[in-house]
Image (tube, coloured by chain):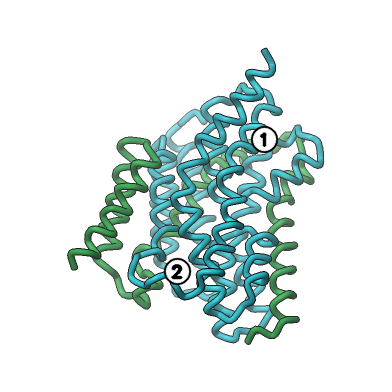
Chain colours: A cyan, B green
Amino acid sequence: MAGVGIKSSYWRGFRDGVPFLAVIIPFGMLFGVVGTEAGLEIYETLAFSIVVIAGAAQFTALQLLTENAPTIVIIASALAVNLRMAMYSASITPHLGALPFWKRAIVAYFLVDQTYATAMIDYETRPAQPVEDKFRYFLGVLTPICPPWYFATLAGALIGEGIPAGLGLDFALPIAFLAMIGPMLRTPAHRIAALVAVILALGFAWLPFNLGLMIGAVGGMVAGARAEVALGLEP
Amino acid sequence: MTDTAQLWLIILALGAGSFGLRFVFLGIVGNRDLPPWLLRHLRYTAVAVIPALIAPLVVWPAATQGAPDAPRLAAAVATFAVGYFTKNVLAAMVIGAAVLIGLNALI
């Protein structure tokens, strides 16, 4: 019953992606509101979300735009925030590298924090599923995450300044990521990686261009890999 | 600001750059085998990058101009604790948001 497999992979992904609506909608709307307040046209704010499709980088770019930073600094800083996408790309390749070129291009465009984290949990739980099922699962995950990101941005841009301050909307992103990170800390090596990353990111937060993030990320990865070897953990 | 040409240059450069970063390994490496040492590091990508991204946002929230904020810290601890102990992402988000909104209403 291949049909059942196709359906269940897509819908399993869809179900796992749906909870992120609670984050994507307020966060996308927040970007729309901030974009309007920064003086962007509605279609310009929407183009940002469709072309770049990376919340943290978009907010970084907007922030620097309002500070009248040089264009090259804006581009470099926002791409530095997005350097982790290259790590996601490398880390998901063992699971999806066997797909045809055009499907890999589709996955690459939609590879954001939430789709990556959700898919990796599933692929590591069910490593034996066929690559086409993994692709369908990914399509399922992105459906309630990426298109709502565009629509929420548009809604936020239209609403403009109508959203009251003090709702704590700025904290939607940290809460989303904090909720995701707990279940990912499966072994002592994962916990060491996260702890080292936090300490380094805080210690080097004073560095410009988000270099603290990169130092924390690379340091955490190295610490996790070292801990895996030292503790003799099986992957 | 809102120099239109500058804005579109930024949007298009970020779009191309972000896609390039996402595609570099998936598109070019494909299904060739990656060396074990690289895979060992990549296993810890998400648990390193995401905490490094959010830790400064939790400790020094932009909304308070970087001043540590008790409701946000409490919400962060509650969210992480629920996620860690129950492995339920949605429950963690809901409880974290409830703690933040509740404490902001009280204070």
Tag 1–tag 2 contact (CB < 8 Å): no
Residue at mark 2: A204
Q: Residue furthest top?
A: A1
Q: Circle 2 — which element?
A: loop
Image: B74 above or below A66? above
**Residue type, numbered disc 1:** Pro
**Residue type, numbered disc 2:** Phe
Share a chain, discs 1 and 2? yes
Badge 2: few (under 14), some or many (20 or more) residues near its Cα, within 10 Å?
A: some
What is the number of callouts on the image?
A: 2
Can residue B78 be seen?
yes
Q: Which residue is drawn at 79% across and 46% down?
A: B28
Q: Nearer the viewer, residue A154 or A111?
A: A154
Q: Residue at x 54, y 32 (%)?
A: A122
Mark with earlier residue (1, 2): 1
How many angstroms separate mark 1 from mark 2 (CA)? 32 Å
Q: Position of residue A4 (x, y in %)?
A: 63, 18
Q: Residue at x 70, y 48 (%)?
A: A108
Image: A148 above or below A45? above
Q: Residue at x 46, y 31 (%)?
A: A233
Please identify the quadrant where the N terminus of chain A is shown.
top right
Q: In which quarter of the image is residue A168?
A: bottom left
Q: Mark 1 lies on which chain?
A: A
Image: A193 above or below A133? below
Q: Residue furthest left?
A: B106
Q: Which chain carries label 2?
A: A
Can residue A189 be seen?
no
Question: In the rendering, which numbered label is found on residue A94?
Answer: 1
Q: Circle 1 — which element?
A: helix
